[in-house]
Image (cartoon, rainbow, N blue to C red):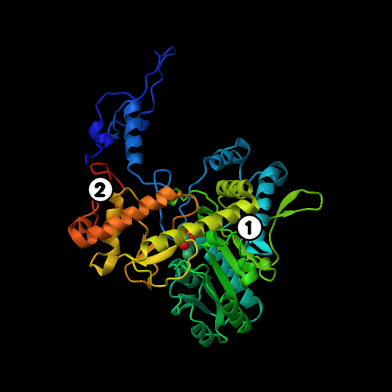
Amino acid sequence: MTDIPTLYELSVPGRPGTSLPDCDVPPAPLPDDLVRADNGLPELSEPEVVRHYLHLSQRNYGVDGGFYPLGSCTMKYNPKINERLARLPGFAGLHPLQDEASAQGALELMHRLQEALKRIGGFAGMTLQPAAGAQGELTALLMIRAWHANRGEPGRDVILIPDSAHGTNPASATMAGFVAVEVPSDGRGNVDIEAVSAACDDRLAGIMLTNPTTLGLFEERIDEVAALVHAAGGLVYGDGANMNALTGIARPGDLGVDLMHFNLHKTFATPHGGGGPGSGPVGASAALAPYLPGPVVEMDGDGRYRLETPARSIGRMCAFHGNFGMLVRAYASIAGHGDSGLKANAMAAVLNANYLRVKLRDRYPVPFDRTCMHEFVCEGRPDGTRARALDVSKRLMDYGFHPPTNYFPLIVPEALMIEPTETETLATLDAFVAAMLAIADEARDRPDLLHDAPHTTPVRRLDEVRAARELRVAEPGDPE
Ligand SMILES: *Cc1c(COP(=O)(O)O)cnc(C)c1O
């Protein structure tokens, strides 16, 4: 693989990036303290700079470039019409401090999105503020704390979290001042109901349930779990990251969930954007809605929209109104699909995941092998070979696919969590299956091929621990 030279290596002293016409006014000298000769900037023509960045961008792997089955992340295609709508000057050019009267259209869009998410989730209230799923978790946990304090039970400090949960769950519970207590999963991959029952005492503040679970399975006794927790005075938080399986089919609010975050960048096709803006709206039951962060958008009798802070609000979670551009994209996605389209998406996401599960399970063991939702978890050691999930993933890159999620959830050894989403064709799914089966053969016949993979990518196998601990985002040779 050839390396792309840095801008500094390409630099030619004196080569300008622009050409200006001859000056037709007397030149005015710049103040001395503004002129620096030692700034070390590369000197290049405009096309050289454009090509440099284009080539760099082409080394990145995105959902526009290929199949991206990263489990739990719902890397579905992001329709370009949503981008166009978010860029409409009336949305993109608004100032967040503009008065309500001059921003009625934006407020109406936020109101419509609030209503749509309430309807989809079965909730009475909705905040669009949180800037990510994890911030939605924190928002809901702070609401749970305020709820118990308001009822004179500030001593309720335990949050139950299944052992299959996303790492953000215990982190959010701890940040909100709770004690996170792990509960095991049972043999079918559900939360162990006996363990929940045993933990139901007067210290219980609530439980965080992900449904479908991170095993890609429907939490079969969620109504019983919710009833147990409620009877003990606790609340049920739903981690809604996996709503892509349920949208239009089941409503968490109807299943006993009091509070839940949505990930607009998962379920509603807004871009994940390389760590860029996300959005994690939180829905609340009628009893919890007064605790939502403010402001939320209300509609008056005369059809005008205004911002309102709920009566017992925990306060703000985000500056201004959340990541507004993401709200526009998500609303475009919801309105563009309509109810029947959203349901069809969920059905196709579930069908695609089950197709892959059944095609792969003879070579890649699936420990909790029942009809899955939008994703499933298999063991990344084909046919009992010594290959590891990491080897399979790295080798997949040679076949042109983004790897699935590795080593999560923690309760499956050598876990590969595969989520195809609804936006992929049968031909793509079959190509992925063919690659996975070919890799299983290689694991048996040529294990070194896996162990040394990837072979064809611009960067070969990284020392992942070092890459995380000693992150260097500058190009070699760049001034630090
Ligand atoms: C993605 C995810 C989260 C966190 O969402 P972010 O938007 O990444 O903060 C929480 N729980 C589960 C199950 C997830 O998949």
Above-or-below relation of 7 to 384: above
- The quadrant of the picture occupied by the N terminus is top left
Q: Viewer-proximal residue, 6 or 210?
A: 210
Tell me which residue sits at (53%, 61%) in the image.
245
Q: Is residue 469 visible?
A: no
User: Where residue 359 sits in the image (x, y, percent)?
Assistant: 39, 60
User: Where residue 209 sits in the image (x, y, percent)?
Assistant: 52, 72
Q: Is residue 307 left or right of residue 184?
A: right
Earlier in the chain: of badge 1 and badge 2, it is 1
Q: Badge 2, how many Cα within 10 Å: few under 14, some, many 20+?
A: few
Above-or-below relation of 38 to 204: above
Q: Viewer-proximal residue, 81 or 230?
A: 81
Above-or-below relation of 465 to 176: above
Q: Badge 1, how many Cα within 10 Å: few under 14, some, many 20+?
A: many
Q: Is residue 239 left or right of residue 467?
A: right
CB of residue at label 2: within 8 Å of ligand 1? no
Of the residues shown, which amino acid type is indicated by label 1? Leu
Tell me which residue sits at (27%, 23%) in the image.
14
Q: What residue would you read off at disc 2?
A: 459
User: Where residue 48 sits in the image (x, y, percent)?
Assistant: 31, 28
Q: What residue would you read off at disc 1?
A: 117
Q: Tell me the distance, in whole angstroms, between the alpha carbons under discs 1 and 2.
A: 41 Å
Of the residues shown, which amino acid type is indicated by label 2? Val
Q: Is residue 252 left or right of residue 298?
A: left
Above-or-below relation of 42 to 304: above
Residue 451 - label: none
Q: Secondary structure at mark 2?
A: loop
User: Where residue 446 sits in the image (x, y, percent)?
Assistant: 18, 58
- The quadrant of the picture occupied by the C terminus is top left
Q: Is residue 45 visible?
A: yes
